[in-house]
Structures are given as C-alpha cells and as structure tokens.
Image (spheres, helix red, strand yellow):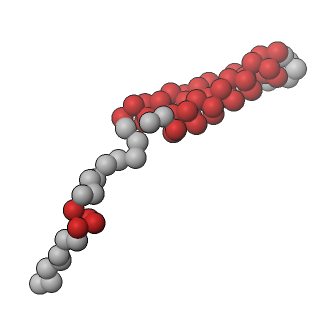
Amino acid sequence: MIERKSTPASQGVKDELVFTKRNYQLLLISIAIVVLGFALMSGTTDIYDTRKTLIAPLVVLFGFGFGVYAILKK
C-alpha cells in the first residue's frame, strides 16, 4: 500500500460547506416564490389582466432577486 504524507498546506484545511442550512432554506423559499409567480400568470381568461401583466412578473423577479440574496448571504 502507498501511504500518503500530509503536507502542511493540507493540514489546516477544514471540510466546510459553501452554503449553510439557512442558505438552502432561503433558496427553497425563493423557488417557491418564483413558482407562485408563474402560477399567477397561468389561466385562460383575460390575457391582459393586471395580475398577469404586472403583479405576476414582479413576483417572479422578486423571487429571482431573493434567490440571488440567498446565494450571496454569508
């Protein structure tokens, strides 16, 4: 068997995840917000309704912005 020697550079390295549990929770919330926005856009009645042309796209954009925040939060 070949035995690996540890180098001084690799001794101080911890196995640390990039995201915390809180980041994943925020990401799931942002995905839910985006899905809600797309659900608000769905339907066959009155394609020019304020809900479909204004509110739903703003909800989707907010969801994507919240997702960016969830990724960048330290």
Is residue 10 shown above or below 18? below
Is residue 6 shown above or below 17? below
- Across and down, in percent, residue 63 comes to 62, 29
Q: Quadrant of the N terminus?
A: bottom left
Q: Viewed as shown, does residue 64 lie left or right of 5? A: right
Res 51 visible: yes
Q: Nearer the viewer, residue 32 or 21?
A: 21
Q: Nearer the viewer, residue 65 or 36?
A: 65
Residue at the location (62% across, 24% down)? 36
* Extreme residue toward the top, this view: 50
Residue at the location (26% across, 65% down)? 10
Residue at the location (15% across, 83% down)? 2
Q: Viewed as shown, does residue 70 lie left or right of 6? A: right
Q: Quadrant of residue 3?
A: bottom left
* Extreme residue toward the front, this view: 8
Q: Quadrant of residue 68?
A: top right
* Extreme residue toward the bottom, this view: 1
Is residue 37 shown above or below 51? below
- Across and down, in percent, residue 49 comes to 84, 16
- Across and down, in percent, residue 46 comes to 85, 18
Q: Viewed as shown, does residue 60 lie left or right of 21? A: right
Q: Quadrant of the C terminus?
A: top left
